[in-house]
Amino acid sequence: MADQAIFLGFDITFWILIFVLAIIFVSFLAAAIRMVKEYERAVIFRLGRLVGAKGPGLFFRIPFLDKLLVVDLRVITSDIPKQRVITRDNVTVDVDAVVYYRVMDPSKAIVRVVDYADATNLLAQTTLRDTLGQVELDELLAKRDELNKKIQGIIDQATETWGIKVTAVLIRDVTIPPEMQRAIAKQAEAERERRARVIVAEGELQSSKTLADAATKYQDNPIALRIRELQTLTDIAREKNMVIVTPTQTGAYLGEVVGLAGAVAKKRRSEQESER
């Protein structure tokens, strides 16, 4: 009986030990297995030393020895708050922009900079002020695409050592002081007036050239000039003018025409009376 009790006690202890070891193994396995998504990478440090980046999917790590940091590889949108910028022509404006970037090397992004998101945002703010401070207001308003590419190139070159790729920089809004808005409006109005005067002058020039050509043709053909005079008088008569002043020769010729027209009208009236 004593031997059976000892065997039974040993058996229970064995199974308890197996159960404890199984729990430890499962816990160890659960701590060792990690998973990251397709757009993530896990940067692993073993006893403080960089091992590398793992993922996507399942991977193993040594519990209590490995520490991992997950980095997102998707494009990050960073909103740059409004920056007070003084342009080269001493105009103060507020500029708002957006920076698009992504992590290309997770290990560099973790090891070479404390907070790559904050560092990129602050670098973008400084670059925005420095770059726009070297241009005039007209260039800032008219050449926004060129300035976007220039700022992007400067930031991208600086963040390359951090494993960051800047994909785009967009100047979203430029706020101009009210007094400068009024000055720009006056300038635009003056420019439109100048263009209107130039258009009128060009029209007068073309008209004078056309009239000069017509005068040359009328000089070569006096009959055509006389017909044109009669058409002009006809146009004047349509306005019901009482007195028409004409040159002597034209007046005599016109008088003959009017007399002939009166004789024809008188003859028609007499024929109508005879029929009655």
Image: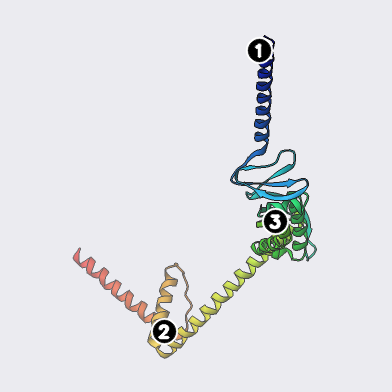
The crowd level at tag 3 (other Cα within 10 Å; few <14, some 14-19, many 20+) is many
Q: Which residue is mark 2?
A: 225
In the image, residue 68 sits, relative to residue 97, either above or below, namely above
Closest to the camera, between mark 3 and mark 2, is: 3
Task: Give x and y (percent) for residue 166.
Answer: 67, 57
On-image quarter of the C terminus: bottom left
In what element is the residue under mark 2?
helix
Task: Give x and y (percent) for residue 100.
Answer: 66, 53
CA separation in Å, label 3 and label 2: 85 Å
Q: Which residue is mark 3?
A: 163
Q: Residue at x 30, y 76 (%)?
A: 263
The crowd level at tag 2 (other Cα within 10 Å; few <14, some 14-19, many 20+) is some
Task: Give x and y (percent) for residue 158.
Answer: 74, 61
Asked if the residue under mark 2 is in contact with the one under mark 3, i.e. CB atoms within 8 Å, the reply is no
Residue 41: image tag? none
In the image, residue 32 sits, relative to residue 88, either above or below, namely above
Residue 4: image tag? 1
Q: Is residue 193 left or right of residue 257?
A: right
Asked if the residue under mark 1 is in contact with the one under mark 2, i.e. CB atoms within 8 Å, the reply is no
Q: Is residue 206 left or right of residue 267?
A: right
